[in-house]
Amino acid sequence: MSPSVAASSSRGFDTKSPSVSVDEKKKRRMISNRESARRSRIRRQKRIVDLANEKALVAKRLVEGYKEYSAISKSHLTLQSENEILMSEKMRMVQYLKNMHLFLKYISENCVETKETTINRADLVCI
């Protein structure tokens, strides 16, 4: 044995020892990287599932919103139609009241009322 090998052997250094620890470190790092990649895949899969669930929830809300919009729109059209009918009825009633007012004005200006009958002033003969 050479003196340097004998000296290193006597000091507790093994020539294979450093390469074994390097291989051991590589093996541990490889295992750690695999675990990290596995956790990353699990997180990504969970994120995908969460996004799919959120998409389904948003789609459900969208359908509900559309149904609500349709119901409100239908109600609006019904109320709008009823409003047009009522506005037309109002105009008819306003015109009727105007005509009644004119008629009552004509009656009050041209007729004399007695207990028994109403007499047109134009038909009265002054004596």
Image (cartoon, grey):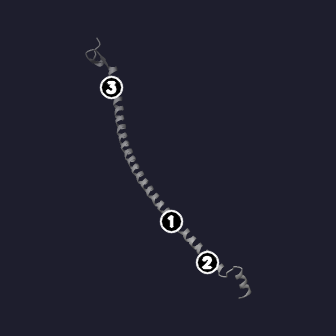
Quick check: 29 left or right of 44?
right
Give the camera-side residue of 86 and 4.
Answer: 4
Amino acid residing under circle 2: Asp
Give the camera-side residue of 118 and 5.
Answer: 5
Q: Residue at the location (71% across, 81% down)? A: 10
Element at badge 1? helix
In this view, 30 is above or below 3: above
Give the camera-side residue of 110 and 83.
Answer: 83
Q: Which residue is mark 1?
A: 42
In the image, farthest residue toward the front: 10
What x and y, as percent, mark residue 2? 72, 88
Element at badge 3? helix
The crowding category of the residue bearing disc 2, from other C-alpha atoms within 10 Å (few below 14, some 14 to 19, many at least 20), is: few
Amino acid residing under circle 3: Phe
Q: Which residue is mark 3?
A: 103
Q: Residue at the location (33% across, 23% down)? A: 104
In the image, farthest residue toward the top: 127
Camera-near label (2 vs 3) is: 2
Residue 90 figure quarter: top left
Q: Which residue is mark 2?
A: 23
Quick check: 114 left or right of 56?
left
Q: Are marks 2 and 3 in contact (CB under 8 Å)?
A: no
Q: Which numbered disc flags the more N-terminal residue, 3 or 1?
A: 1
Element at badge 2? helix
